[in-house]
Amino acid sequence: MSDLTKKVHFKIYRYNPDVDQAPYMKDYHIDVPADRDIMLLNALFLIKNEDDGFGYRRSCAEGVCGSDGMNINGRNGLACITPLSSLKEPIVVRPLPGFPVIRDLVVDMDQFYKQYEKIKPYLQNSNPAPAQERLQSPKARLKLDGLYECILCACCSSSCPSFWWNPEKFIGPAGLLQAYRFLADSRDDHTEERLAELQDPFSVFRCRGIMNCVDVCPKGLNPTRAIGKIRSLLLQEAL
Amino acid sequence: MSLPTYEFDAVIIGAGGAGMRAALALAQSGYKTALVSKVFPTRSHTVSAQGGITCAVGNTHEDDWRWHMYDTVKGSDYIGDQASIEYMCKTGPECVYELEHMGLPFSRLDNGKIYQRPFGGQSKNFGGEQAARTCAAADRTGHALLHTLYQQNLQAKTHVFSEWYAIDLVKASDDSGFAGVMVMSIETGELAFMSARAIIFATGGAGRIFQSTTNAHINTGDGVGMIARAGLVLQDMEMWQFHPTGIAGAGCLVTEGCRGEGGYLINKDGERFMERYAPHAKDLASRDVVARAMALEMRAGNGFAPNGIDHVKLKLDHLGADIIKSRLPGIRELSMTFAGVDPIYEPIPVVPTCHYMMGGIPTNVHGQVITKDTNNQDKIVDGLYAAGECACVSVHGANRLGGNSLLDLVVFGRASGLHVQEQLNSYLPRKNASEADLEAAMSRHQRWMTDKNGEHVSDIRAEMQKIMQSDFGVFRTGEFMEEGVEKLKTLVERMKHATIDDHSKVFNTSLVEAMEAENLLVTAMATAVSALHRTESRGAHSREDFPKRDDENWLVHSTYQQENHVMGTREVNRAPKFIEPFEPKERVY
Ligand SMILES: Cc1cc2nc3c(=O)[nH]c(=O)nc-3n(C[C@H](O)[C@H](O)[C@H](O)COP(=O)(O)OP(=O)(O)OC[C@H]3O[C@@H](n4cnc5c(N)ncnc54)[C@H](O)[C@@H]3O)c2cc1C
Ligand code: SF4
Ligand code: SF4
Ligand code: FES
């Protein structure tokens, strides 16, 4: 590895309620390696080495834990799998929109988790469990692909206008994706109860099909399609 | 002092696989339980586990827990505790079925049963043909497992303290053990004393002591640090697994399941070199064996980039797009993101990378923490438990087999939860802490929050990682390790005067990182001293100056105590309950 570096310009949202009156954008000109690409998370790390009052969440550094959702040049994504080379300067980084800011890039995700909890995100089966596994055909199992992989990063819900406006009533794309994950599981027999709880005009029906969620999901998941499937299940029920 | 006190019957520190399984075991008990985690539970490192969870459910061929046990004992290079290994292999199927009933979305075989794939070091019939024993949810088993356990804890209404950091154990004022743990809300900076009759450590690994690791940033050995500072014993700290296939330069793991599905390693001449090193098991030899073979290939100049980030390659393209897309989708994603390579068309550049801590906090089969009394005899610490990667119940000995960690988490997470419940029923009094005890447990925090203008902690952390990488890696020698230990000792001194600039309260990540760095350094020191002490090669610990296994002197656990860096030994358990113990043999694959 050589020591070749180049300067990159960042504008980062800063707010520490302990010391700051109001949020502000702070400029950083940081030396990053010139001979290879790094991820935005590595760059944030370099910034923190210079300015230790700067805060953000991170854990896995490989796009599977969902800690570092943030708004990067206007678009939600995970810092750890966003290559610096893909970003135009100045690189503008803000906390996920629509959530209260705790500090710098750290947001309060309580509302997001509450919506997730509301859909009862656990398998429900009223029959006693067999001595071995419950059987499930590969075909039935295939229905869970594209659903169970969600990492609860909130990139989707935080880019959804309906979620901004009704964070208490609209479940939001992430929660609804999981609602469908359990509806789609051949081992879960609480379909009716689950649907009954989603029938009100807000939980599901606030989705306007704007597809921002699909656009930003770093795992390539498609909440809009799942929401569509829940809607048709609800309509079938109604008939 | 206006320190808030929270009273619980049991406190579990850590919400990875081990901690959340323990919490579930306690959920129905009626005992007041807290689950404390420095990150939101599903951000714990278990989420990264890929390949699967190993156990003899026998879905693709006839299988037997005794065969699994044989492989695990052999894999451990004979210093795994056989009573624990037996318990894990025998209870394993039950624990995996439980996970399935909880909703874990396992991949399936055509007959609807859980899909199982071959992993390294697995055999049928005590060393016969390759077995396929690892239950998998594609290559996202850890994610599926962790989310499932979190969901179950939601249903069970477990009391979760998310983004709370455990600082240190609080001693009981009568010296009879521990009264609880000092914790901090990361969001507000508020300190609190959690008084508990039982405490379970489930704090995970510490791979961040090395420069290059598959481990998350949060794997900082906090449990190891707390136990060491409390004057208790650590065990087998020299035993670190280097996983053969970390992506060169990035460190992210590509699962052994890739080789289980038929992938293999090649050198720069395109040769499948494992055929030379392990003629029988080839690429599915035990991890220590494969990692060493790779290091030797690169040393012989057979790597792809001898002047840069040297590496060999993992070839998958012959498997075909369908297998890769259905069984290894996460690997494809990672290698495209971090190596710029689509494995459907091109091999992935890989190097052995620090992966797993086999040593840790010694426990018995119930998860009860063991230390030594003043006469050097084993002593159970009442009310203290450990499970998962931070623990050394010693099912992995000197080398862990793939898929055995996730199993370890659920088997011993459950076992410790159940045992805590039993003990709470019969005794385990609540203990008191004096002002002085509480202050002692806060002292680290207080120092970081007041000291100013010292050396920055990140420099010390970086130096430590460099030392560990160069002197305590895949191959070790006495001379370099001695130097390494001395260098680490100076870092320990420097750490005492290091400071952070940020003294504010709300979500102070610098403060958390500083306290984590202290724990990393404790872990690194324990590793270094233990590695220098064990004068033989066994499992993952391979010394160039002592290249042979030495059963006469070293068929034992090593123990380490922080004060004065005292080393000792503990006997290996070779008394399984239901079968004859396996005797040490030469390990060939
Ligand atoms: C990339 C990768 C892939 C792997 N794949 C496999 C596999 O396929 N099969 C397998 O068997 N094993 C695998 N492993 C190993 C396995 O995943 C880990 O050993 C295991 O997940 C550790 O689980 P744990 O519950 O002990 O700890 P973790 O999951 O690491 O959880 C630790 C918990 O402790 C908490 N914590 C730590 N310190 C504190 C503190 N001071 N205060 C409060 N909370 C704290 C954390 O917040 C976290 O909740 C893999 C490992 C890696 C790195
Ligand atoms: S499609 Fe629905 S859920 Fe997705 S962003 Fe639009 S309104 Fe939100
Ligand atoms: S659906 Fe995608 S964007 Fe939304 S929380 Fe899950 S992983 Fe994140
Ligand atoms: S740090 Fe885990 S998703 Fe980015």
Image (tube, rainbow, N blue to C red):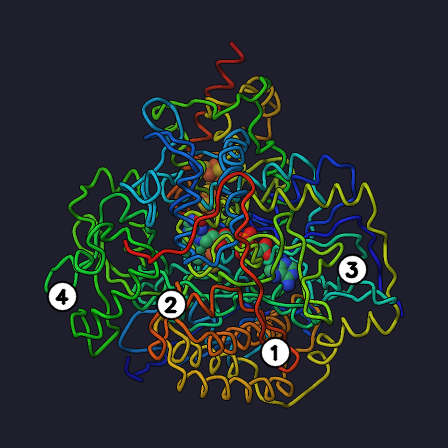
- Marks 1 and 3, how far apart in space? 26 Å
Instruction: Of the two numbered discs 1 and 3 on the same chain, state the one appearing first in sequence.
Output: 3
Q: Is residue A77 visible?
A: no
Judged from the image, the secondary structure of the residue bearing numbered disc 3 is strand
Amino acid type of the residue tagged 2 in the rendering:
Arg
Q: Residues within 10 Å of mark 2 (few under 14, many from 20)?
A: some
For mark 1, name the chain. B
On the rendered structure, is A226 left or right of B393? left
- Marks 2 and 1, how far apart in space? 23 Å
**Same subunit, tags 1 and 3:** yes
Judged from the image, the secondary structure of the residue bearing numbered disc 2 is loop
For mark 2, name the chain. B
Amino acid type of the residue tagged 3 in the rendering:
Gly
- Marks 2 and 4, how far apart in space? 31 Å
Q: Badge 4 is on which residue?
A: B268
Q: Which is more foreground, mark 2 or mark 4?
A: 2
Q: Which mark is residue B180?
A: 3
x then y, percent, for residue B8? 80, 50
Classify B383 as above or below A220.
Answer: below
Q: Is residue B369 visible?
A: yes
x then y, percent, for residue A106? 58, 61
Q: Residues within 10 Å of mark 4 (few under 14, many from 20)?
A: some
> Does the numbered disc 2 mark a residue whose Cβ is under 8 Å from ligand 1?
no
Q: Badge 1 is on which residue?
A: B566
Label pair 2/3, CB-CB below 8 angstroms: no
**Same subunit, tags 2 and 1:** yes
